[in-house]
Amino acid sequence: MKMVRHIMEVLQSNTKYNMKKYIPILVIFMCFSFNTITKSQALPIYSQYMFNEYLINAAYGGTYSFTPIILNHRNQWVGFGDSAPQTSSLSVHTPIGQKSALGGLMIYDKTSPITRTQIQMSYGYHALMNKESNLTLSMALSGTFNMLQYVYQEGMTYSELTNGIIDNYNQSNESSSVADINFDLVLLHSYFDLGLSVRNLLAPEPNNTIYQDQILRTKYILFHGTFLGVNSTEKSIGIIPSFVLRKMGIFSYNSLFELDLNIKIIYKNKIWSGLSYRTHENTISTSIGINTSKAFFGYTYDIGTSTNLSGYHNGSHNIAIGFKVFGQNKRLIRQQNPLELNINSKWERLRLTDMRHKSAK
């Protein structure tokens, strides 16, 4: 990491032309420097899952009272230049029949000059375990298509641009693709969710020499939980704490863990504000959002507390827009979800007549 910081200082002392020329090389080096340190590389969802649970676990598919169509976009390291990473995602999922669900997801990530695309299709099954507590086990199996591609930069080939930096890529090709499988579980209760997601089942298992394949896949596990609370319609405010724990590999013993801690405060199911902390990058995120009966909007700002890179960018921005379509789902799987808590949701209008003194005529 000290080497990355030193290179940044050297490049900033050069001319503007040289900065543009070497920024793509620097970004690649930084990404793989992070990968060397953490020995992990996955599609960067970061704080996007705060607005879309389906991003981290396809077993959430079909568990809402509506069909959500959600668009996310993240602009990372604002002020770093045209080579700053950008990630976009589009997802939709809906219940099918009495116990099934279907979902789809597309993620596009660009860290110039490399782009990664993932297309996912999932099938979910919901099994009611306890009717009184509405305890349900939701399972999902997803098929994914992953592609890594090099975007030409000023006439340089991928091999020329990454010479001496990337050695695990087949330099005879400018792109590579592969299919994979994810398996997801979520235990849904009226008051909480607990989930387990096994990603990239066909990818290599991390060990002392191999951590990823030619398209930067690695096998990893997500364990996450959300406490929705014992709420009632007499309250107007709800608090939702949650966590996400990532572990690289399934069977290998290692210390490659990443932890996210989140808390969200919701008022009348209309407005929310949240705070998150990611241990992997020492990043603090703040979020706000607006929720209506037909759509919702969310915004997140991330700022890194690490001194290695914080001086070279102005944080990261993430926006999410969701649409609730196809009306109400009669087959209600969850009594509560982050967009529909069991709290007072009536938006009372303040009228001028309500502000008059009782003695006024």
Image (cartoon, rainbow, N blue to C red):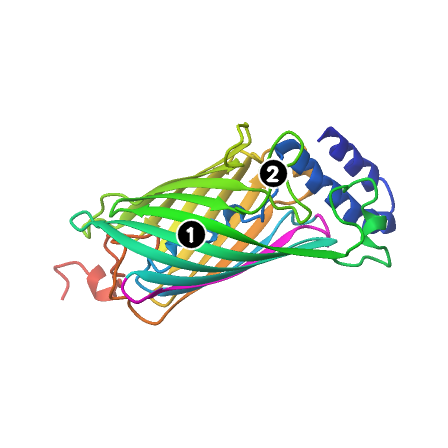
Q: Is residue 140 left or right of residue 255?
A: left
Element marked by disc 2: loop
Q: Position of residue 212 (x, y in %)?
A: 64, 41
| Amino acid type at image mark 1 | Glu
Q: Quadrant of the N terminus?
A: top right
Q: Position of residue 55 (x, y in %)?
A: 47, 53
**Front position in the image: 299 or 48:** 48
Alpha-carbon neighbours of circle 1 within 10 Å: few (<14), some, or many (≥20)? some
Q: Is residue 101 left or right of residue 180?
A: left
Magenta segment boundaries in residue numbering: 80-98
Mark 2 vs mark 1, foreground winner is: 2
Checking the image for residue 287, the label placed there is none
- Residue visible at 52% across and 39% down? 284
| Residue at image mark 2 | 40
Q: Quadrant of the C terminus?
A: bottom left
Which residue of the protein is positioned furthest toward the bottom in this rendering?
A: 326
